[in-house]
Amino acid sequence: MHTPTLPDDQRTMRWPFFEERHRRLRAELQDWSVRNLASVSHEASEVDITCRALVQALGQGGWLRHAIAGRAHGGLDDALDTRSLCLLRETLAWHHGLADFAFAMQGLGSGAISLFGNAEQQARYLPRVASGAAIAAFALSEPQAGSDVAAMQCSARLEDGHYVLNGDKTWISNGGIADFYVVFVRGVEAGVTPPTRGTAGIHALIVDAQTPGLSIAERIDVVAPHPLARLHFDNARVPAHQLLGVAGQGFKVAMATLDVFRTSVAAAALGFGQRALDESLRHVRQRAMQGQMLADFQLTQAKLADMATGLDAARLLTYRAAWLRDQGERITQEAAMAKLTATEHAQRVIDMAVQLHGGLGVMKGCMVESLYREIRALRIYEGASEVQQLIIARELLKA
């Protein structure tokens, strides 16, 4: 049986973006992944159980601490190290798509608390996230307001020391298994019709999963099995002390959180793309065709060259963005460039990998078939590719 291992990436790890601690981190996670992820289920029917188990395993292994800011609350440092976050996602994605998902959603779901939570909120939630004892979720998208946050209609009115929530959130990762949600809602006054558009007046609230009035309206099945759901709020009462940051500044909270984790989406795409390239290299060296190996054909070699070159270009953009953020720079444009390039090219790499595998490439159980399903969503969530293009252009036009 083929035992999956990452190829020698010492040349990449010598790039000036990385420090010795990043090299150790990558090597340690690689070793842990080989021992802990090789036999983890990929079955859709077991996705909830598998995701919960992965969160616990990642917590027990100490890996979730890298997705949490604040040493007092389970994190490794006072600030999130974006390069570590990206290295972890790239490595986990190479080994197991759902392991990357479980890690990433713990970070994204609690990221707003790490960045904007007060001491009490951080103490209540972050240690449990870091240990794997609590599952986090980030609830921003709505049926008519996905990438268009300004169209948000889920509302909250302040009443007797509580925010009363009404409306729906959809495409929520960890929906149905999360212990709490960071929910973004439009603040309204009683008896006043809320505006139909705009980013002003949006609140960010921490909502515990057992809050009366919060229900799972439906579970959502997608091409790569992940726990996703639509949430429904029917006069759900959330204590006002669950407000994150400043009232009306929820859009800022959401965008700051996404700026950190958008770069890590690019890293996950790199992991998927690199696994597809590595599987292809192994396959073409073993597949006999017309009296020679598939690797001997120039058409094959041209595909491999395009796959490797595009991945390296995307990797440079990704770790440039991560390094800049770790230097304290604003990276809205760089993160968008990295996410756009990495996800789009990884899709092409995986498509070429399927083609190189021929009929095997579309068989259930074949790694590249699984990767083909895993990569597609990355071009959409946390801002579709077209949205990244708009962000890049907007930033350029500011100059």
Image (cartoon, rainbow, N blue to C red):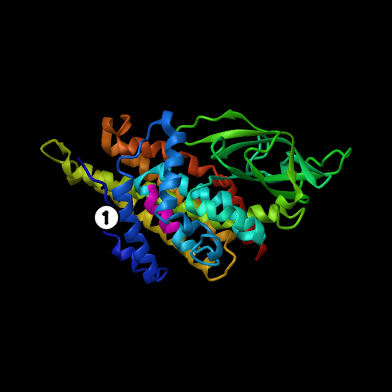
User: Please, is residue 233 above or below residue 335 in the view?
Assistant: above
Could you tell me which secondary element the residue under label 1 belongs to? Answer: loop
Q: Quadrant of the C terminus?
A: bottom right
- Magenta stretch in the rendered image: 86-93
- Majority SS type along the magenta span: helix
Report x, y in % for residue 80. 53, 63
Report x, y in % for residue 30. 32, 55
Residue at 51 percent across and 61 percent down: it is: 75
- Hey, which residue is sitting farthest right in the picture? 191
77 relative to 140 in the view: left or right: left
Residue 8 or 79: which is nearer the viewer?
79
Residue 224 visible in image: no
Residue 105 or 141: which is nearer the viewer?
105
Task: State the residue position of label 1.
Answer: 7
Residue 373, quarter of the rendered image: top left
Residue 1 or 148: which is nearer the viewer?
1
